Image (tube, coloured by chain):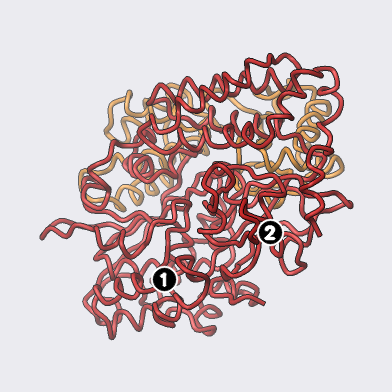
Amino acid sequence: MGRKLLLEKAHVENIRLYEVYRREGGYRSVEKALKSMSPDQVTDEVKKSGLRGRGGAGFPTGMKWGFLAKPAGVPRYLVVNADESEPGTFKDRYLMEFIPHLLIEGMITSSYALGSNNSYIYIRGEYAWIVDILEQAIAEARQHGWLGKNILGSGFDCEIHVQRGAGAYICGEETALLESLEGKRGNPRIKPPFPAVKGLWDCPTVVNNVETITAVVPILNDGGEEYAKIGIGKSTGTKLISACGNINKPGVYEIDMTISVEEFIYSDEYCGGIPNGRKLKACIPGGSSVPILPANLLLKTAKGETRMMTYESLADGGFTSGSMMGSGGFIVLDDRQCVVRHTYTLARFYRHESCGQCSPCREGTGWMEKILWNIETGKGKMSDIDLLWDIQRKIEGNTICPLGDAAAWPVAAAIRHFRDEFEWHVNFPQEAQTRNFGLAHYADALELTV
Amino acid sequence: MPVQFSDTTLAEVKKLVARYPDGKHKSALLPVLHLAQDEFGGWLSLETLDYVASVLNLSPIEVYEVATFYSMYNLKPVGKNVFEVCQTGPCMLNGSDEIIAYIREKLGIGPGQTTADGLFTLKTVECLGACGYAPMMQMGKHYREHLTREKVDQIIAESRK
């Protein structure tokens, strides 16, 4: 059994309620921080922990906090990014739905460190029922003196507000999120200035993912150094993985970053293997934006080493033969699945979610969707595969925000690793309509599976 | 009948505006549009958008540009029950295409359409963050997950009551 820091108490009956959460040791990190530590000391613990942003980019959280500008007389803000919308990702929802007080506790401690007296949770509009759960937790916390004026006699004031989005993946990008929180369209801002200097209402702002902020609780309770002892290298602590697709036990798992990808997929403690006697064909290990890997490259790196569930190991081989930890949205495809069709649904997603600001993304995502649809439905030409490659290259790196890259990478990786499947669709359009590309080509890969 | 929030909703708007610093009331726009959609029949007419602009003291264009950007705001009337079925990758891997086809067949409408009796609207949507419980759809404030044909039958029957 791996260490559990976030979900340890998730199954305690009624843990959603304040009394139960408090009885189980909740809000100790707030007591510790406000009674015995300065804000900078809290930030130092987070720096020592090696915690990396859990939203997808993996940027060191302590460093991000360290960038926050602190001009006198200007309010600072903590904004929690709960706009979880990356296909394959549903871990933040799990945290908020089942242990809402963990987020509230993490926010109070983090707000103290950052000097934010009004902190906001920006939650995707579709999670409407979770807004009620969070509002209830906030009301309970306020009632028990954890929010409001002069918390625990420390002189620190803090309020938490929940803001509902209204359906836009792009608002998970931090500057688009801030625009949306200001009541505007979610168009990402040009950086610099970064939010740490000019964020919400032009004030210094830190935007952190839900899971990142909840991790601050065990970091404060046990100390940053203890947290850093878990995991391998720069992948410290635990990570939530939301597993889905063709596996026996889809769901949210907390892993300490010491297990292999193979163990994660086949162990009964986690995904429990592939259902119906099917075989593993491919996997997108970190949310729809990261490169898809065929089974052979997923379980072992190109150098033949066991691939581990860590930031470094998942990225081993770069985009040639590796992928990314990303948001931890782990999507498994079994041998019935068509990579062209799956990639088409992702291309459609990115076309739908492009904000339209930058031409390469606005136009390119539409082109990619149409071309993939043609190939999938037997109307594709061989030159279309090269055209797709060309378009994704012209999007990547040429947009204001990373949505362009996020749209380009899945298409690039699908062609890189499954080009024969695209060609098969072009060569055998009739067959492509009635059955999926066979697995013969991946026989070598499949021998690796348990 | 002119568009007008109830007193309860107006009090709610006031509370929303108070969450932001002075002069930053525009931040209340998204939540207030949700309130308006809930109160005025599940969609936002031009008249409603103009009304929201007047309530928040914004120019109408500021409200239009937001209302047209976000996918949850309906700019056309919808049925009493709106089925928003996810069709993105992870749901597709678990049979969302078949579920969408089944709903189309049962209700006799395509995505974006409403049944003649005004009871049902079908929408296909992109990832709702329920990938582990696929296939799924949103109905109002809640998710319906692990959809099967039988479960769709049951939901339709429930909604007809």
Colour in which chain A is shown? red
Position of the C terminus of chain A, as image quadrant, is: bottom right
Q: Label 2 marks which chain's residue?
A: A
Decide if residue B2 is in sight here.
no
A216 w.r.t. B69: above or below: below
B112 w.r.t. A166: above or below: above
Residue type at mark 1: give it: Val
Q: With B129 as the anchor, is B32 left or right in this view?
A: left
Of A49 and B110, nearer the camera is: A49
Colour in which chain B is shown? orange
Please report the residue visible at 68 percent of the width from the left and 41 percent of the height from the top.
B137
Provide the secondary structure element on which disc 1 rests.
helix
Q: With B147 as the anchor, is A96 left or right in this view?
A: left
Decide if residue A362 is in sight here.
yes
Residue type at mark 2: give it: Gly
Residue tagged 1 = A216
Position in image of residue B141 (x %, y %): 60, 46
Residue tagged 2 = A251
A52 w.r.t. A333: above or below: below
Position in image of residue A445 (x %, y %): 76, 48
Position of the N terminus of chain A, as image quadrant, is: bottom right
Which image quadrant for residue A138?
bottom left
Provide the secondary structure element on which disc 2 rests.
strand
